[in-house]
Image (cartoon, rainbow, N blue to C red):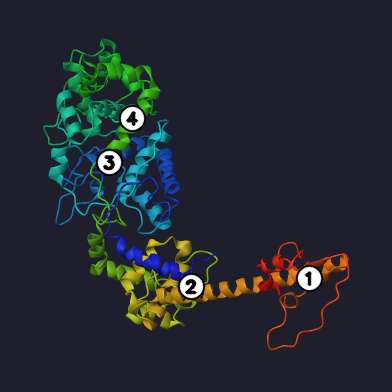
Amino acid sequence: MASSPAAFAVLAALVLLSGTSSAQLSTSYYSYSCPSLSSTVKGAVQSAINSEKRMGASLLRLFFHDCFVNVRASQGCDGSILLDDTSSFTGEKTAKPNTNSVRGFDVVDGIKTAVENACPGAVSCADILAIAARDSVVILGGPTWDVKLGRRDSKTASLSAANSNIPPPNSSLANLASSFSNKGLSTKDLVALSGKQGLNFFFFLVGDSSNGLYNLDIAGAHTIGQARCTSFRAHIYNDSNVDPSFVQTRQSNCPSASGGSGDNSLAPLDLQTPAGFDNNYYKNLVGKKGLLHSDQELYNGGSTDSQVSSYGNSQSSFFADFAAAMIKMGDISPLTGSNGEIRKNCRKTPREEHASMSSPREKVKREVEALSIPDRANNGRQLGAAGTNLNTITPCAACKLLRRRCAQDCPFSPYFSPHEPQKFASVHRVFGASNVSKMLMEVPEPQRADAANSLVYEANLRLRDPIYGCMGAISALQQQVQALEAELKAVRTEILKHKYRQQAAAAAAANNVVVIPTSALLGPSPDVAAPPPAVVPPPAVHLLDGVSGYRSINSPSSIARDHNLSYFG
């Protein structure tokens, strides 16, 4: 059933005000604005992992690196890692912990495109990263958890913040625990999150970083990725807390001398199940077969040995703690409410996107594309949901009024026909074209035709009654409803009275009873001559009663006490 125009008009007004309200993360944040979000993201992530198994860990690591970098004190999981460099800032992609390390940006772009097609302008890139990380873990055999949503995207990024917020290579266990503590995460969270991401791949690469780069080309999770020789050379040649047979195996394809082709030799981070999400990583550490130095630090006679052993013995315990730690990490200083923004392109802020689209080169490109559409004026286009009566003629009423070229993806075209220009004229006069576009984009595509009709309804009423608008019409309709309800109640009362009289007459006829009208019992009025006394044959005299239909009368006092006489007489 179509939405009430007046009700939607009120909702549309709330949409305009929503940008200034504060908000908290919620697992049901997109239940109305993008109900297909979960299935859309999961399908795209599944496709990416089917094409490349290690992509799941790459997406997981992107989320880790995004949350741990605070451009400002109030920013954590904000999608800043996805931004390209601009003239006003240098982004995080080229930071030391990220260079030749983080990957999967093209996959995020594909997911964002799919989400935008389903729910334009509704879902942040930060939330897409959070969902993609969870889906990657689940697809690779790990635990699931309810992802809290409602994050907004950062308007900037910082190279220096990425370099300073992410711990440097060869950090001690104490330094790593301190770094986690600064983000509100415990040592328990540290060990749990290391299980799939691994400390060094969570943050950095152990190895030769003299060239200013962290030589990394892995998926990001220890049991579902690989590391270069430069990342573990020092560990297998210099450290003593390594299993001898493991050392021999790793040294066979990782020479001690650096600078040769052996630098790029790869080794799996998890010996048993390099492409699965399980607890074998902890079993490797207990057996002194951790590939990286700082991984083995988790099981090296320190305070975290017992937790590593516990996870090695119980996969369910590891899964539960990992899911809990992921939820806590997702809560690191998100932007919500009116803070931040929603990017349509995860690589660019809306301002940068607009600037690039406004460049002379892009304008020429779009005009050429528009002119290349064959017989565009006659063939038109169908941009709305199937089954709705939408405009297919160009240019639309909006573009005519605004005197601009009607682009192929014009948000107004499906809903404002050039044959009814007054509709958009009214809407534009009351709300403004930019606000109308925003409100339409906030609504799921199948509901936009109803939304446009509701905006036209509200605009016309606002022009007629600038003070009350649709609320004046709603009030008048409510008064009409109340009057009709009162009239209906009176009619129903008369129907009941009629039915009771019929029942009483039928009962009297069946029992040879004379029904005496109320006026006969109470006597005539003073100015009317009294009629001759009535002759009442036996067996009895009954009075019409509102409940049973009639009543026996034993004395005049009983008549006086009958409150139904004046009602049915």
Ranked by sequence position, the earlier of labels 4 and 1 is 4
Q: Earlier in the sequence, mark 3 or mark 4?
A: 4
Disc 3 and disc 1 in contact, CB within 8 angstroms: no
Q: Which residue is mark 4?
A: 322
Disc 3 or disc 4, which is closer to the eye?
A: 3
Residue 369 tag number: none
Query: To which quarter of the image does residue 67 belong?
Result: top left
Give whichever of 459, 195 is nearer the camera. Answer: 459
As drawn, 265 above or below 310: below
Q: Is residue 403 above or below residue 443?
A: below
Q: Position of residue 533 (x, y in %)?
A: 82, 79
Of the pair 423 and 227, the residue shown nearer to us: 423
What is the distance, in whole Å, between disc 4 and disc 1 at their CAs? 78 Å
Label 3, label 4: how far apart the Cα atoms are: 14 Å
Query: Within 10 Å of the Cα at label 1, are there few (<14), some (14-19), or many (20+) other Cα atoms?
Result: few
Which of the two discs, 2 and 3, labels the residue nearer the N terminus?
A: 3
Tell me the CA gap for discs 3 and 1.
73 Å
Mark 4 or 1, closer to the camera: 1
Which amino acid type is marked by label 4?
Answer: Phe
Quadrant location of the N terminus?
Answer: bottom right
| Amino acid type at image mark 1 | Gln
Among the two numbered marks 2 and 4 on one chain, the one whose residue lies closer to the N terminus = 4
Residue 331 is tagged as 3
Cβ–Cβ under 8 Å for marks 4 and 1: no
Q: Which residue is more in the foreground, 378 or 456?
A: 456
Callout in the foreground (2, 4): 2
User: Which residue corresponds to mark 1?
Assistant: 502
Considering depth in this image, is 443 or 252 the residue closer to the camera? Answer: 443
Q: Which residue is mark 2?
A: 478
How crowded pointer 2 is (Cα within 10 Å; few <14, some 14-19, many 20+) is rated as few
